[in-house]
Image (spheres, rainbow, N blue to C red):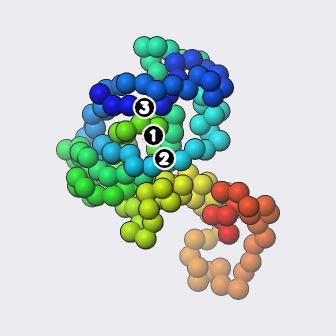
Amino acid sequence: MMKAIGFTKAGGVEVLKELKVPIPKPGPNDILVNIKATAINPVDYKIRQSSVNASESNPVIPGFDASGVVAKVGEKVTQFKEGDEVFYAGNIRRNGTYAEYHTVDSRIVGRKPTTMSHFEAAGVPLVFLTAYEGLVDRMEIPADKTVNKNKYAMIIPGGGGVGSMAI
């Protein structure tokens, strides 16, 4: 069993509580991560306020961003091993990262930069992905720096998480 923070009914912060839940088992492409740090994003409170399927028998554990250490790997995982430090933004279809352990598809995980602490790394994934998708996927700005040489974009506002990543 592990500790997690979650909820059994939709609502405000008052519905969050400590839970004792089974440690998840990784599927073939998954890794089990011992979470060292997680981040809070606006999507977390939106899920908490609107999760009508949450119940005592089906608690919801929020959280997307995490940084931690690989505790176990699924049988098809080749790019990670136990003890590797990783960071990632999880999947909305699974329970989240407000827990001691979390399973995630290894194909959406990156190695934690050695120059960052777990706390720093946990704050990066979702805001970076949002900024990248906005610039590259939606605005079709090429990711290749040579194509963008001497070209500029004005990013307003740049003080939040996504804006600061875009800058």
Q: Residue, x 66% and y 26% (percent of image)?
A: 12
Q: How many C-alpha atoms fall within 10 Å of the one at disc 2: few (<14), some, or many (≥20)?
A: many
Give the quadrant of the C terminus.
bottom right
Q: Residue, x 26% and y 46% (percent of image)?
A: 71
Q: How many C-alpha atoms fall within 10 Å of the one at disc 3: few (<14), some, or many (≥20)?
A: many
Q: How many C-alpha atoms fall within 10 Å of the one at disc 1: few (<14), some, or many (≥20)?
A: many
Q: Residue, x 37% and y 39% (percent of image)?
A: 100
Q: Residue, x 30% and y 43% (percent of image)?
A: 32
- What's the residue type where badge 2 is placed? Thr
Q: Give the numbered dot on residue 4.
A: 3
Query: Which circle's residue, 2 or 3, is located before the other in the chain?
Result: 3
Locate residue 120, reporting x and y percent. Answer: 50, 60
Give the CA distance from mark 2 to mark 1: 6 Å
Q: Give the numbered dot on residue 31.
A: none
In this orientation, which residue lies closer to the viewer: 61 or 128? Answer: 61
Identify whether 84 is placed above or below 94.
below
Q: Helix, strand or loop at disc 2? A: strand
Q: Which residue, given by chain and number where applicable, does mark 2 sit on? A: 38
- What's the residue type where badge 3 is placed? Ala
Does the CB distance between marks 1 and 3 fall below 8 Å?
A: no
Locate residue 85, reporting x and y percent. Answer: 33, 58
Q: Which residue, given by chain and number where applicable, does mark 1 sit on? A: 97
Q: Is residue 130 visible?
A: yes
